[in-house]
Each structure stands twice: as C-alpha cells, then as structure tokens.
Image: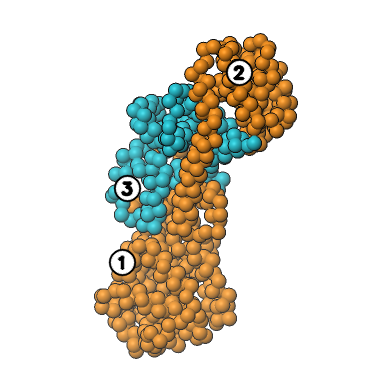
Chain colours: A orange, B cyan
C-alpha cells in the first residue's frame, strides 16, 4: 500500500503526477520529524519507531493521499531526488529511477554514504534499491511497517487503487511492476525476510537485484515472491514463508491459536495485538448493522461516536417516555390508589368504580368494536384459566389483576399471528374493554369478572 | 458476517417478553404505593424509569449478560436489597480484564477514547475489555430499542382518546 503511494511519488519524476509532490512533502515532513543526522535507513527506521501511533500514520497517509495540491516550493530539487531514492528503495522499481538515479548521487550523498558500506556491489546495480536490505535489516521496522501496511490496507485500498489509472499512462515499467506491488503485501515480502535473518536478507537482495540484473539464479526466487504476492493480494493472507500461522478460534480449547500472517513479525505481543484488533473490528461491523445510518460512516472513531450518540439517544428516549407514562398515569394512579384502599367491600365500591371506569372507557370506546371480537375469540380457549377473586370487583382492580394474568395472556398471544405494535396497543385496550364489559354486566354475578379475566 | 454472528450471540427476546416484564413492574409499582402516592412527579418518573430499566434487564436475560447484571445490582443497591446471582462458569473475570487493560499502552488511542465514553454509558462497562464491551453494547442497544418500542406503545395506548 505504501508502495503505491511511494511509487506514484517516484513515478512523478517523468510525468508530473499530482500525488507525488504531496507525498514527497509528506515524506519530507516525516524525515524532518527526526532530529537525527540524515541517514536514510536510520531516519526511516526512527520514523517508524516514533510514529508507532497509528493515528499519526493514519493522518500522514491520509494527507498523502488526499492532498492533491503540490507544495513544491517547500523543498529543493535535491530533496526531491533524495526522497525519490528513498521511495525507489521501498518500492523496488529501479527502472523508474534510471534518470534521476544519476542525480541522486550528487545531492543524495547522505543517502549514499551508508549504502556504500554494506552493499557496494549492489549500489552500482540499483542505486535506489539496495538499501532495502538495510530497511529490512531492522526487525522493528519490519514489524511496524507490516503493521502499518496491515492497518492501512483496508482503508487505503480504495484510495491507493485509484491512482493506478492515472499511472496507466506511465511507462510500461510501472505496469509490469503492478503485479508485484499489490496493495498491502508489497512491503511484506521484503519484510518477511527479516525474521529469518541474513539468509532472507540475501533473498530480498536477490529479488531487488533481479530488476536490474536478471541473473538466472535469482529469477526463480523473485518469481516465487511475485507469485505469492499475486496469489494473495488480500490483507488476510495465509501462505508459506517465514513463520506462518493461521487463526482459528477453537471453542473447546482455552486459548486461541493464531497464525502470523505472511510478512509479519511473529512476536507474541504483536500477534495478540493483531488478534485483538481484528476482534474489535469484527464487533464494530456488528454494531454498524445495529445502529441506523452507520453505513455511510467509515473509520472507527466516527462510527464509535455514532454508536455513543445512538445509545445516548435511546436512553434519553426511555427517560422521556417514562415521564410521559407518569403523566398519563396520573389519572389511573389516583383511581387505583383510591380503589385499592377500599377494596374490602365490593358492593359499595361499584358506584365509584363505574364513575372511574367511565373515564377509562372513554378512551377505549373507539376501539371496543375492534377488540370485541378478540375478546370473544379468547373466551373458549382460556375458560380454564379462571382467576376468581370475588373480592376484586372493581374495574381498576381487575385491570391490575389482569396484569398478573399476563402469563396466561402470553399463551394466548400465539393466537395472534404477528405481534406488532398495533397488537400491543390492542392489548392495552383490551384491558380497558374488560372494564367496560364488566360495567355492562354489572348486574351479573361474580362469574363475570372471572370470565372477563379469563378472556384476557 | 455470518461467522461472526455465530460467535457473538446478540439475540434478544421478543417484544412481548419485554412488555410482560414492564407491565408487571408497573403494576408492582402501583401496588407498592397504594396509600401514599408520591406527591412529586419527579419521584414517580424516577420510579417508572427505574422500573423500565430493571424490567428490561430481566427481560433481556436476567444475569446472563454483564450489563444486565450490573444494572440489577445497581438497582438492588439503591433499594438496599441483595441480588442473587446464579453460579456459572466464567472465562474471564472482570478484575483480570481491567488489570490487563492497564498494562497495555499500545491500544489504539482513538478506539480507547470512544470505549471510555461507551463504558460510562453502558452499565457494567467499567470492568470490560473493549471487545467485550462492544458485544455488550450491541446487546444493550437491541434491548433498549425494544424497551423503547414497548413504552411507546404503552404511552400511545394510554393517551389515546
């Protein structure tokens, strides 16, 4: 992924590409972040060290990708070349830097010096590509780079792929290199050789040298790498190579087996870190489906903000509705409280009950017709569920007593094919209609109340 | 993510379970205060709200969820009651996860900031790791939305004229 960005920056040397100056400026910013003496590999390593914070990297990369306006005036041509060399090393495209490579030695001497000591031979061949070994020589760098490539690949895949059409007009060399540099794993094969040590360093060197030399001995390994890259362009690769492991969650064992992905460090901490991050992203996706309007939002931070807002709004809604309920219930509360205090003598209470019931039923009258049928339907089924309480003749009392019979009620719910919100309101109104029917059958015996209750 | 859904269970009971629990708690509320109806409406509101949360926690699965457990414990503490928790096998205790949390500095700070805010919102979030917290949040959101629907229906039903 970074390779594409760098490649674009590098490719800009011939035809101007929008992203190149911004990327080089960003690179410059990164490099300037370091107070160390200018040593390309070292500075880059330090950069990687200091910017382990994903957020910084994220913002840096986003500035890389999103800012199209060049800030050429900021740096001289020499720095441009220096940066291009750096980019070239990382992207392993020696061909592109054919022309500027010669210039690189002039002002990029700072880069040249450390290169000269370990790998003089290769320096001749690919001035821009040799120090990759030095990059890869730093295991920490490898780990972090891999981590960054992993992290960024998801969010940058879309963006990094877009510059490709721009570069299609570029020299053929770039297109040839395309298969070698897929979104994230381009860096990985370079980095994957790190844990294996010196031998792998040579492996990567051979690969890099292949671009210029085409030596027969190195063709096969480089091709292998290419194939590997091609076959596994996605982020979640499981492959042969150094220290590969796959992730599987075994519910029967106590711990999770994790396999390090290709090109990543096998450090236990980083593995656990990666597992944890994957878990979190998994759950974020789950939450995304739950929270409405979260599909458009990308990025963990914004989505989490959305989720938090949603939870807050739901809690506020609960509070608001409880307020409303309390206000609506004042009448009922009063009635019920008054009635409950005088439940000993049902006969004397009936008059009062009627008065109160009337208040209740005025609200239910409109729906009585609808629910009458429902009541009749339930009669035959729940006739056995008689909760006879002769003392409880008050309508509101029966209303309350209806509530404990909700257990039976839920059995009858199965009668209703769909339990929609309308049904719920109908249930509430049934409670009222019970009272109404009770009033109508006022003169009848106690069978009625129990019958009414059974109807529920 | 079909595979993820099998691993992360965020099933929530049907609406009628929530309705049942809420109505029961409401009736209990009313039977509890027969003589002295709270003069201040705020108290009544608070009681109803508390009843709503408690009934939601019960409907959602009682003590099988971390947030519901914390909610019930909080409510019981207010009433000076004790909550009975059934013994069940737990893989990770809350204390361990919080200890582990302190030792890890490399967590993405962006995520952790939001997780902190979420912890304040979701009951029982203080002792959970971020990934577990998100699970609980998902379940909590589902239950909350269900409870809101139930309450809305109730209010509509009662206020209709």
Question: On the image, which quarter does residue A376 sit in?
Answer: top right
For the residues bearing labels 2 and 3, Cβ distance under 8 angstroms: no
- Residue located 31% across and 66% down the image: A49
Res. A181 in view: yes
**Mark 1: which secondary structure?**
helix
Q: In terms of image quadrants, where is residue A253? A: top left
Q: Relative to B116, is A378 on the left or the right? A: right
Tell me what residue is drawn at x 33 percent, y 52 percent.
A269
Q: Looking at the image, is mark 2 or mark 3 nearer the viewer? A: 2
Q: Secondary structure at mark 3?
A: helix
Residue A15 percent coordinates (x, y): 52, 85
Instruction: Give the residue number, with chain letter if any, for mark 1.
Output: A50
Label 2 residue SS: helix
Camera-near label (1 vs 3) is: 3
Q: CA distance from mark 1 to mark 3?
A: 23 Å
Chain letter, disc 1 residue: A
Query: With respect to residue B109, does A252 lie above or below?
Result: above
The answer to whether residue A160 is above or below residue A298 is below
3D distance between C-alphas at marks 2 and 3: 66 Å
- Counting residues from the start of the chain, the first of labels 1 and 2 encountered is 1
Question: Where does the C terminus of chain A fall, quadrant-wise?
Answer: top right
Image coordinates of residue A245 in percent, x first then y, are 43, 51
| Residue at image location 42% in from the left, 85% down from the top | A72
Host chain of mark 3: B
Q: Compared with residue A292, is residue B59 higher up or lower down, i.e. above or below?
A: above
Circle 3 is placed at which residue position?
A: B101
């Amino acid at each position: 992924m970074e390779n594409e960005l760098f490649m674009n920056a590098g490719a800009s040397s011939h035809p101007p590409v929008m992203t190149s100056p911004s990327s080089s400026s960003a690179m410059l910013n990164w490099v300037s972040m370091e107070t160390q003496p200018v040593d390309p590999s070292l500075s880059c390593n330090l950069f990687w060290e200091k910017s382990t914070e994903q957020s910084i990297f994220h913002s840096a990369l986003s500035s890389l990708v999103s800012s199209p306006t060049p800030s050429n005036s900021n740096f001289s041509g020499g720095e441009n070349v220096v940066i291009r060399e750096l980019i070239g090393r990382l992207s392993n495209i020696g061909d592109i830097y054919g022309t500027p490579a010669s210039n690189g030695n002039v002002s990029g001497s700072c880069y040249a010096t450390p290169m000269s000591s370990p790998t003089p031979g290769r320096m001749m061949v690919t001035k821009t590509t040799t120090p990759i070994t030095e990059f890869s020589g730093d295991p920490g760098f490898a780990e972090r780079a891999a981590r960054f490539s992993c992290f960024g690949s998801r969010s940058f895949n879309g963006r990094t792929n877009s510059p490709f059409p721009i570069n299609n007009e570029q020299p053929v060399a770039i297109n040839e290199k395309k298969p070698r540099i897929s979104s994230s794993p381009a860096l990985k094969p370079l980095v994957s050789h790190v844990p294996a040590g010196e031998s792998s360093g040579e492996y990567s060197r051979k690969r890099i040298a292949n671009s210029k030399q085409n030596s027969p001995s190195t063709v096969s390994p480089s091709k292998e790498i290419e194939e590997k890259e091609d076959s596994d362009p996605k982020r979640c690769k499981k492959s042969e190579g150094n220290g590969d492991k796959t992730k599987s969650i075994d519910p029967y064992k106590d711990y999770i087996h994790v396999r390090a992905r290709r090109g990543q460090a096998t450090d236990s901490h980083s593995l656990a870190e990666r597992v944890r991050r994957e878990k979190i992203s998994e759950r974020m996706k789950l939450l995304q489906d739950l929270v409405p309007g979260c599909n458009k939002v990308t990025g963990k931070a914004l989505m989490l903000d959305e989720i938090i807002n949603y939870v807050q709004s739901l809690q506020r809604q609960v509070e608001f509705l409880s307020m409303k309920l309390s206000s609506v219930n004042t009448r009922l509360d009063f009635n019920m409280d008054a009635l409950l205090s005088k439940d000993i003598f049902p006969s004397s209470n009936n008059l009062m009950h009627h008065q109160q019931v009337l208040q209740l039923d005025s609200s239910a009258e409109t729906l009585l017709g609808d629910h009458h049928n429902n009541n009749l339907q339930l009669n035959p089924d729940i006739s056995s569920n008689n909760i006879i309480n002769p003392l409880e003749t008050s309508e509101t009392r029966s209303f309350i007593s209806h509530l404990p019979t909700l257990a039976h009620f839920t059995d009858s719910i199965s009668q209703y094919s769909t339990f929609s919100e309308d049904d719920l309101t109908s249930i509430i109104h049934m409670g009222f209609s019970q009272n109404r029917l009770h009033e109508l059958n006022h003169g009848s015996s106690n069978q009625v109340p129990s019958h009414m209750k059974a109807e529920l | 993510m079909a595979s993820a859904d099998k691993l992360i269970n965020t099933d929530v009971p049907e609406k009628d379970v929530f309705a049942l629990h809420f109505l029961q708690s409401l009736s209990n509320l009313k039977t509890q205060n027969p003589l002295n109806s709270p003069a201040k409406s705020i108290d009544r509101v608070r009681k109803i709200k508390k009843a709503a949360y408690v009934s939601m926690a019960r409907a959602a699965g009682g003590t099988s969820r971390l947030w519901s457990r914390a909610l019930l414990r909080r409510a019981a503490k207010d009433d000076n009651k004790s909550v009975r928790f059934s013994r069940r096998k737990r893989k990770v205790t809350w204390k361990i996860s919080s200890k582990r949390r302190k030792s890890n500095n490399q967590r993405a700070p962006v995520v952790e900031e939001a997780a902190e805010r979420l912890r304040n919102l979701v009951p029982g979030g203080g002792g959970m790791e971020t990934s577990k917290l998100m699970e609980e949040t998902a379940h909590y959101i589902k239950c909350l939305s269900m409870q809101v629907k139930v309450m809305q229906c109730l209010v509509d039903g009662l206020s209709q004229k």
